[in-house]
Image (cartoon, rainbow, N blue to C red):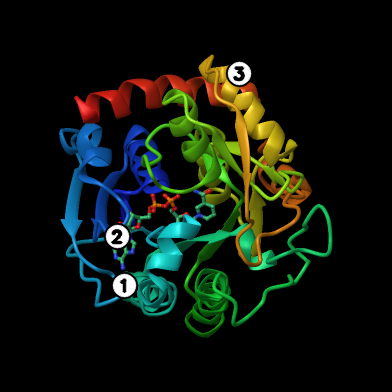
C-alpha cells in the first residue's frame, strides 16, 4: 500500500506517517512547512519506503506512481497559527482539499480528511455526536478554520457522491503529545513551556471552560481503525475525559514538578465553553476506545518536551 500524507511534517501528520510505515506502507509526505518542521521528519527520513516533498498543496498536488490513499492533514491547527494565516488556512481547507481529492480521484485512491471538533463551533449540544450540525460564527476570527473544515467535509462528500471516491472523515478533538511545537499556542504545549520555565501559566478567563484531550497514540489508533472500517460519514475521535482548563493547568504544574502559579488572562473571541466528544459511533463502528489517561499522557509529553526543547535550545 502507498499513501500520500499532506501535512506529514506536522504534529499529527508525522505520527501518522510513522504508523503507516509500521504497518508496512510506503509513504510520501507533502508539506510546505508553514507550521510543521523538518525536525518532525527526522525519525522518518531513514526509514525504507518514506519520501518527503516540499510543496504547498493549495497551489497543486502532483505525486507520481500508484497511490492507494491520500490523507489530507495539511492545515494550520493551532488557533494562533490560523489566526496569523487566515487566507492560507481557508486556501488549504478549500483549494488544498480540492487538489488532494483530485489526486485521489485521478489515482483511483481513497481520500481521508482530517476534520475537527471545531465544525461544532461553540456547541449547544453536549457531548457532541456526529449528528449535531454545530454552532459556528461564520464571520468571526475562528471561522477561517471552522468554515474551511466544514467546506472540506462537504467537498469530500461531494467527491464521494459524484465520483465514487472512497472517503473517510475523522473529526479530531483536541489532541496532544510529543512533537507539538514549542510556541504552537495550544493549551498543553503552552502550559508545559511555562511550567518548565517556572513562569505563571496563562489561563484564559476563569479557566472554567472545558476541553477533552486525547493522547496522540490513541488518536492515531482511532484513525487507523477508521481507515479499516466501512464508514463514509464523519466520525468523532477524541477522549471524552473532560477537564476544565484550570484543572489542566494544575495537572501540568504537578506533572512538571514546577512551582509555577496560575495567572488569568482575557479569553479569545468565540472560545468554546465546552468540548467533549460523543464517541459511541467510533466505539460501535471500529471497536476503538482511548486507553491513555490524561495524567499518563501528560507525563509522556512533559518528559519528551523537557528533553526535545532543551536539546533544540542547546
Ligand atoms: N492536533 C489537534 O488537536 C487537531 C484537532 C483537530 C483537527 N486537527 C487537524 O489535524 C491536522 C494536523 O494538525 P496538527 O495538529 O498536526 O497541526 P500542525 O500545524 O502541526 O500540522 C499541520 C501541517 O500542515 C502543513 N501545512 C499547512 N498548510 C499547508 C499547505 N498549504 N501545503 C502543505 N502543507 C501545509 C504544516 O506545515 C504542518 O506541517 C490538521 O488538518 C488539523 O486541522 C488537529
> Separation of disc 3 and disc 1 at Cα?
47 Å
Q: Residue at x 66, y 44 (%)?
A: 286
Q: SS of the residue at dot 3?
A: helix
Please give the label number shown on residue 231.
none
Q: Quadrant of residue 53?
A: bottom left
Q: Quadrant of residue 70?
A: bottom left
Task: Determine contact: label 1, label 2, CB under 8 Å.
Answer: yes
Q: SS of the residue at dot 1?
A: helix
Q: Which residue is mark 1?
A: 103
Q: Which residue is mark 3?
A: 254
Q: Residue at x 61, y 56 (%)?
A: 230
User: Furthest residue to the right?
Assistant: 125
Residue 127 location in percent, x, y?
A: 81, 52
Q: Nearer the viewer, mark 2 or mark 3?
A: 3
Placement of 151 over or under 149, stated as above or below: below
> Ligand 1: does it lie within 8 Å of the C-beta at label 1?
no
Q: Which residue is mark 2?
A: 67
Q: Residue at x 60, y 18 (%)?
A: 254
Placement of 39 over or under 132, stated as above or below: above
Residue 268 location in percent, x, y?
A: 60, 60
| Quadrant of the frame with the C terminus | top left
| Other-residue count near label 2 (Cα within 10 Å), few / some / many at <14 / 14–19 / ≥20 | many
Q: SS of the residue at dot 2?
A: loop
Tell me which numbered mark, 2 or 3, is placed earlier along the sequence: 2
| Other-residue count near label 3 (Cα within 10 Å), few / some / many at <14 / 14–19 / ≥20 | some
Amino acid at each position: 500500500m502507498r499513501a500520500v500524507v499532506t501535512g506529514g511534517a506536522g504534529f499529527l501528520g508525522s505520527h501518522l506517517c510513522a504508523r503507516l510505515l509500521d504497518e508496512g506502507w510506503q509513504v510520501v509526505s507533502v508539506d510546505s512547512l508553514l507550521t510543521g518542521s523538518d525536525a518532525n521528519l527526522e525519525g522518518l527520513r531513514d526509514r525504507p519506503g518514506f519520501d518527503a516533498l516540499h510543496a504547498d498543496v493549495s497551489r497543486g498536488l502532483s505525486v507520481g506512481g500508484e497511490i492507494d490513499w491520500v490523507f489530507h492533514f495539511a492545515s494550520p491547527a493551532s488557533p494562533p497559527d490560523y489566526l496569523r494565516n487566515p487566507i492560507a488556512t481557508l486556501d488549504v481547507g478549500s483549494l488544498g482539499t480540492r487538489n488532494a481529492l483530485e489526486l485521489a480521484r485521478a489515482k483511483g485512491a481513497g481520500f481521508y480528511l482530517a476534520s475537527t471538533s471545531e465544525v461544532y463551533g461553540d456547541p449547544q449540544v453536549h457531548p457532541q455526536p456526529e449528528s449535531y450540525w454545530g454552532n459556528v460564527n461564520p464571520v468571526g476570527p475562528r471561522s477561517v478554520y471552522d468554515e474551511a473544515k466544514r467546506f472540506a467535509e462537504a467537498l469530500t462528500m461531494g467527491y464521494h457522491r459524484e465520483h465514487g471516491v472512497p472517503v473517510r472523515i475523522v473529526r479530531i478533538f483536541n489532541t496532544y503529545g510529543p512533537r507539538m511545537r514549542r510556541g504552537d499556542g495550544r493549551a498543553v504545549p503552552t502550559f508545559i513551556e511555562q511550567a518548565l520555565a517556572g513562569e505563571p501559566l496563562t489561563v484564559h478567563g476563569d479557566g472554567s471552560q472545558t476541553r477533552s484531550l486525547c493522547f496522540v497514540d490513541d488518536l492515531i489508533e482511532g484513525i487507523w481503525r477508521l481507515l479499516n472500517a466501512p464508514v463514509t460519514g464523519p466520525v468523532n475521535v477524541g477522549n471524552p475525559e473532560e477537564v476544565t482548563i484550570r484543572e489542566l493547568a494544575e495537572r501540568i504544574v504537578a506533572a512538571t514538578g514546577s512551582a509555577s502559579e496560575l495567572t488569568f488572562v482575557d479569553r479569545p473571541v468565540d472560545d468554546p465553553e465546552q468540548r467533549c466528544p460523543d464517541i459511541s459511533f467510533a466505539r460501535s463502528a471500529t471497536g476503538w476506545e482511548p486507553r491513555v489517561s490524561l495524567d499518563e499522557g501528560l507525563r509522556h509529553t512533559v518528559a519528551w518536551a523537557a528533553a526535545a526543547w532543551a536539546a533544540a535550545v542547546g
